[in-house]
Image (spheres, rainbow, N blue to C red):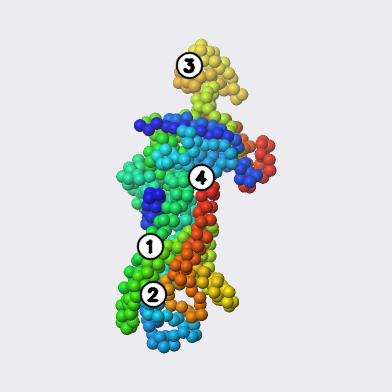
């Protein structure tokens, strides 16, 4: 198992994908921290907090949002990594050598899962280095509290989990939609466009707003890291319930995907 | 010195829907020998090899290496090395890194990777991205990957594809070396008989997923004799007869001597003062046999003159 994980990590670090991702993740972390740090501490916002769909939150939520601002881009990048980890194997037929080296396919796939979690955590840390350093400076300069609560630490740790789970969602998507480009378009399109629109439609009803919308992947992601809320009416899960919800999405996609890979003929 | 292992294919069958890719195939690959796995394109060679390697699940039958299924091997790369497709590389990863990834699964040190790059003759290109590799370099890299764990059994799918004549000669020598010096069991598939006939000890020929013939190369070639053409067929026949070499006239005014000793025939003709217009070993003409046994057998072309396959199964 250790060997399988090591091989998977080596696969990632022997193509150019990884450092492109590293730059993107770092820049997104730092950039969004700067942007949110300025926006969320602006006077107008603080005064008219609440109505009109303007993001609201206390100092903890603001700090959380600033430090995890890059996450909305970060988790899509992890989704991309997840899709490409398996997608490239199909596309370039390297899946053959993968399963020749580790014919117990479940083991090979668990190796992929563990490697994805490790990689996501690594990218997450990189993103946090960017966002916390830039974010803390901006918050201080704007007169806001940089570290209002120890809850911030929990948020930062959970943001790593979020990235890992999104990578697994990508892995599942990458298997279930073997065409890599299609998988990426569908995955990112769903996360960025379809799900928010769907969320709006669902929130139109009370049942939907209270019992369905909070469980959607993006909503759950926001709940885990306790970011500022776009609307005070939104129902939010507690961070651990949201983590289970997102974990459920990851399992829903990754488990059937892995099951299929284990059984499928490789030709 | 590694000792080879026996590969056994027994009653192996694979159906894709109505299409029978491999049909009740049974044969053995003997340890320490090079076996040619021959058949026209689409005969089911690759499907058979993939079933042997646990990549495709057989509909029925078994394929084992020393009695064990591939998937049951704890360290498969140390038992079986396979080179299946020439395109199995990520274009953005260097050849050396491709090997390192495989090596990581079996705790094979990087020094072994470099050793193999040297052995297969591609050290200079090893650090370049594989997307720029020629077909020949891909084949060599695939061979290096197969040898990574110093396995007892080598399974090579069309390894000569894309090699230039120099490369084919190199491959021939390399396989001979692995077999003779290291006692490895080698199964090498090809749709071209000429590519392997000088290399292999045994031959397994399949067509339409079925076994057509299995035997040693000597058996396949046996009884071929020597074709000789000269000005006076009768006089040469008599002269050869005196040396104890039987002859029969062939249809085109030549003489078929029942020997594989070209030199003896030439010398007899010279001693008899007869000009030799042609001297050909019929033994080398396994090609005709190969074409013959596989004739009409290419179901992928749709036509089934032999009537052995019905319907448009090639569409699968």
Q: Could you tell me which residue is drawn at 48 percent across and 57 percent down?
A: A87
- Of labels 2 and 1, earlier in sequence is 2
Residue at (46% x, 52% y) in the render: A109
Pointer 4 chain? B
Where does the image place residue B145, in percent across and percent down from the top left?
40, 44
Say which residue label 3 marks: B268
- How far apart are the alpha carbons under marks 1 and 3? 83 Å
Marker disc for residue B55: 4
Contact (Cβ within 8 Å) of mark 3 with mark 4: no
Q: Are marks 4 and 1 on the same chain?
A: no
Of the numbered discs 3 and 4, the one sitting upstream in the chain is 4
Circle nearer the viewer, 2 or 1? 2
Q: Nearer the viewer, residue A178 or B311?
A: A178
Asked whether the residues under the numbered discs 4 and 1 touch, taking CB atoms below 8 Å apart as contact, a structural biologist would say no
In whole angstroms, how far apart are the C-alphas of marks 2 and 4?
48 Å
Label 2 close to label 1 by CB (< 8 Å): no
The numbered dot on residue A121 is 1
Instruction: Look at mark 2 in the image and give the residue it sits on.
Output: A64
Residue A129 bears which disc, if any? none
Mark 2 chain: A
- Could you confirm whether marks 1 and 3 are on the same chain? no
Label 4 element class = loop
Measured as percent of width and height from the top left, residue A15 is found at 39, 57
**Could you tell whether A126 is left or right of B198 in the image?**
left
**In the figure, B98 relative to B206: above or below?**
below
Q: Is residue A80 visible?
A: no
Q: Residue at x 39, y 60 (%)?
A: A119
Label 3 chain ID: B
Please provide percent x and percent y for residue B65: 47, 35
């Amino acid at each position: 198992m250790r060997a399988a994980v090591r091989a998977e990590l080596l696969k990632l670090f022997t193509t150019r994908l990884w450092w492109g991702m590293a730059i993107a993740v770092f820049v997104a972390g730092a950039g969004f921290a700067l942007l949110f740090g300025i926006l969320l501490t602006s006077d107008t916002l603080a005064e008219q907090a609440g109505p009109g769909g303007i993001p609201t939150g206390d100092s903890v939520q603001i700090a959380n949002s600033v430090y995890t601002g890059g996450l909305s881009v970060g988790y899509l990048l992890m989704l991309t990594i997840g899709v490409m980890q398996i997608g490239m194997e199909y596309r370039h037929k390297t899946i053959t050598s993968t399963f020749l080296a580790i014919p117990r396919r479940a083991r090979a796939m668990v190796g992929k899962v563990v490697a994805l979690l490790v990689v996501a955590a690594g990218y997450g840390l990189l993103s946090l280095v960017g966002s916390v350093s830039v974010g803390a400076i901006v918050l201080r300069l704007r007169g806001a509290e940089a570290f209002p609560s120890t809850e911030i630490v929990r948020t930062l740790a959970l943001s790593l989990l979020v990235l890992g789970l999104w990578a697994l969602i990508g892995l599942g998507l990458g298997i279930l939609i073997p065409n890599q480009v299609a998988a990426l378009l569908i995955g990112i399109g769903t996360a960025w466009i379809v799900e928010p629109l769907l969320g709006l439609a669902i929130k139109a009803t009370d049942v939907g707003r209270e019992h369905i919308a909070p469980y959607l992947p993006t909503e759950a992601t926001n709940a885990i890291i306790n970011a500022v809320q776009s609307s005070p009416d939104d129902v939010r899960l507690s961070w651990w319930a949201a983590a289970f919800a997102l974990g459920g999405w990851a399992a829903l996609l990754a488990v059937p995907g892995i099951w299929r890979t284990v059984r499928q003929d490789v030709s | 010195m590694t000792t080879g292992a026996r590969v056994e294919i027994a009653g192996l069958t694979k159906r894709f829907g109505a299409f029978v890719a491999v049909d009740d195939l049974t044969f053995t690959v003997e340890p320490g020998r090079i076996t040619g796995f021959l058949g026209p394109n689409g005969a089911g060679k690759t499907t058979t090899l993939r079933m042997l390697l646990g990549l495709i699940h057989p509909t029925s039958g078994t394929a084992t290496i020393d009695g064990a299924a591939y998937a049951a091997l704890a360290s498969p790369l140390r038992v079986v090395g396979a080179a299946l497709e020439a395109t199995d590389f990520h274009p953005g990863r260097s050849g050396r890194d491709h090997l390192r990834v495989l090596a990581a699964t079996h705790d094979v040190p990087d020094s072994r990777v470099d050793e193999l790059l040297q052995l297969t003759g591609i050290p200079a290109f090893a650090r370049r991205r594989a997307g720029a590799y020629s077909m020949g370099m891909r084949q060599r890299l695939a061979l290096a990957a197969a040898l990574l764990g110093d396995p007892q059994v080598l399974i090579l799918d069309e390894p000569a594809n894309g090699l230039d004549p120099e490369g084919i000669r190199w491959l021939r020598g390399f396989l001979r070396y692995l077999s003779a010096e290291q006692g490895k069991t080698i199964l090498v598939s090809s749709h071209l008989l000429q590519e392997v006939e000088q290399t292999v000890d045994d031959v397994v020929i399949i067509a339409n997923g079925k076994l057509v013939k299995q035997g040693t190369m000597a058996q396949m070639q046996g009884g071929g004799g020597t074709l000789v053409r000269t000005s006076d067929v009768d006089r040469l026949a008599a002269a050869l007869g005196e040396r104890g070499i039987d002859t029969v006239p062939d249809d085109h005014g030549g003489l078929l001597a029942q020997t594989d000793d070209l030199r003896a025939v030439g010398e007899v003709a010279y001693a008899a003062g007869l000009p030799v217009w042609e001297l050909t070993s019929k033994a080398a003409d396994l090609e005709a046999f190969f074409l013959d046994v596989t004739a009409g057998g290419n179901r992928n072309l749709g036509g089934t003159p032999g009537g052995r396959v019905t319907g448009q199964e090639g569409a699968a």
